[in-house]
Amino acid sequence: MSQTRLRYINYWLQYYKMHQSQWPLLVDEYGQLQRAWSMLVSPEEMGLEMAAREQVILDFIFTLDSFLERRGLIVDNINWIKRGLEAAHFLKRFDLLGRLGQDLGWCYRSLGQPHKALEYLELALAVRQRHGPRIGEAATLNMMGVVYDDLRQYQQALDFLQKALVIRREVEHREGEAITLHNIASTYFSAGQWAEAETFYNSSLELARELNDEPGIAGTLNNLGELKMLQGEVEQATRTFRESLTIYEQLGDRVHVAGVYNNLGMLAGYQGKPRQAIEWLEKSLAYQREFHLDTAVTLNNLGTIYETLGEFQRALTYFEQARLSNQANNRLDQVATNLGNIGGIYLHLGQWQMALDHYQSAWQILANGNDPHAMATMLSNLGSAYYHLGQYEEALKQFEESLAIFRESLNREGEAQTLNNLAMLAVVRESFAEARNYLRQALKINEQLQDVHSQATNLNNLGAVASLTGESAQAAAYYTAALEIRRQIEDKEGIARTLYNLAQIWSSLGDFIQAETLLQEAVWLNKTYDFVNLEPSQLALQEIQNLLNHP
């Protein structure tokens, strides 16, 4: 290779080293870097000793890894790292073999291929346990814990994370200790053990503050905000998200700013404020597109919000865009999720067979996998489709299989949701005692999980069952309890629905004044927040007012 080509390679390597912290500015120059890399790894002679050449290859990889990560160029990164493994083998750099193996594990995890990720992580762990360093061994153990968390194998995740924590404390790697504490918290969060999650998040946050680790502080605050949102502590969630957002903005970290915008959008949706949710999610999407980041999660969330607004065609468009993005990046688990969401839209549209077809397509992706949560969720979705098709025995079979998997994998949140579905099936079969039993089981689990949003749903459904069996006083008590929770967590759409239900009870009891008051508030909420239940509330209010005006 000519000296001109060698100078070209060195120029772009140094250029990227100088601008590593300004990665968004490097996007336009990526083509030049790819050309330099192609020259470097070509078989042509370029005037360098083999060892020197392999070292330059490693320099390229470690200079560009964070850039490739943030750009989402995972496939490029995998190809480069694999060439780096060859270089590390040639140079007998065992320390780098472990690091590069771990990096490949991270890449495959990002592509939604956790089992492939574990293959490389296990190789990296073996190298690091034999050759060191201990700090690297802890990093690989930590990453393996995260991947097992992805697989919903929570006990294995905790085992690896605890081993990482022990080493990081032994070698006094306090930054790593804070990261592992954070990951342990996230695993407990995923497992539905929210009290334990909060304890470890707070420990991680305390250490991050002590170390003045602003990115660590912001990240943990963001996760605490997610936890508080699910616990129904809306004000605390809002404060925590905004504190996280302020830090990320001060750091100029627009990638994570986009992530917090996304969470603020979901919080607004959780509160029954869909238009506000869309504003946050659109801001997140704009940042992601500006910096060429992955948009699939935000697109999916926008679909979810438009679904709550009853704008089903628009929701379908966003879900389909998310599916195409995940398909292009070979994230098959997420493709299955998107297919499931699309199936849910067809349920809303009353196109039961189309819903079933999409659920079955998703199931084909998941059936041979090892993600019990996703498998159980899709079985539950299949049950819903069969329910609407009037195939109740098939629906029961799917729900019961779903429940068994959730229980076996200790996923209590999924267990509670499936019990709720079984209750709705029992209602159409007029097995009201059975329905009530399922709902009480679900309510007990959600109380233990401190999931107040789901508690309100269970209480509302218990009210519906009591209403169907003519137990009006009991129905009113359940609806009132659900309403109290929904007011507490500021779930505007849930409030409107429960007001409507409660008004029907008071109307049946002949208390039209109370029914009118409740319906007036329901209509106001539906109009103000553009909910889909406006028409039934308006019609019911008109009927009540006609009765009051014409006794």
Image (spheres, rainbow, N blue to C red):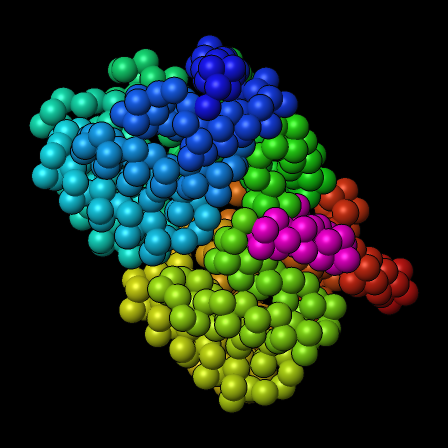
Q: Is residue 510 magenta?
A: no
Q: Is residue 169 visible?
A: yes
Instruction: Determine the residue positioned at 21% across, 22% down.
Output: 174
x, y percentage for residue 381? 54, 70
State whether residue 331 is above or below residue 183: below
Q: Is residue 306 magenta?
A: yes
- Of residue 526 and residue 331, the one placed in the foreground of this image is 331
Instruction: Determine the residue positioned at 40% across, 71% down.
Output: 368
Q: Is residue 420 visible?
A: no
- In the figure, is residue 136 to the left or right of 58? left
- Of residue 489 and residue 516, the one placed in the foreground of this image is 489
Q: In which quarter of the view is residue 128 placed?
A: top left
Q: Residue furthest top?
A: 18
Instruction: Determine the residue positioned at 39% across, 66% down.
Output: 369
State whether residue 522 is above or below residue 390: above
Q: What stretch of residues is rendered in magenta?
A: 302-328
- In the figure, is residue 165 to the left or right of 179? left
x, y percentage for residue 256? 51, 28
**In terms of secondary structure, what is the magenta stretch mainly?**
helix
x, y percentage for residue 267? 56, 39
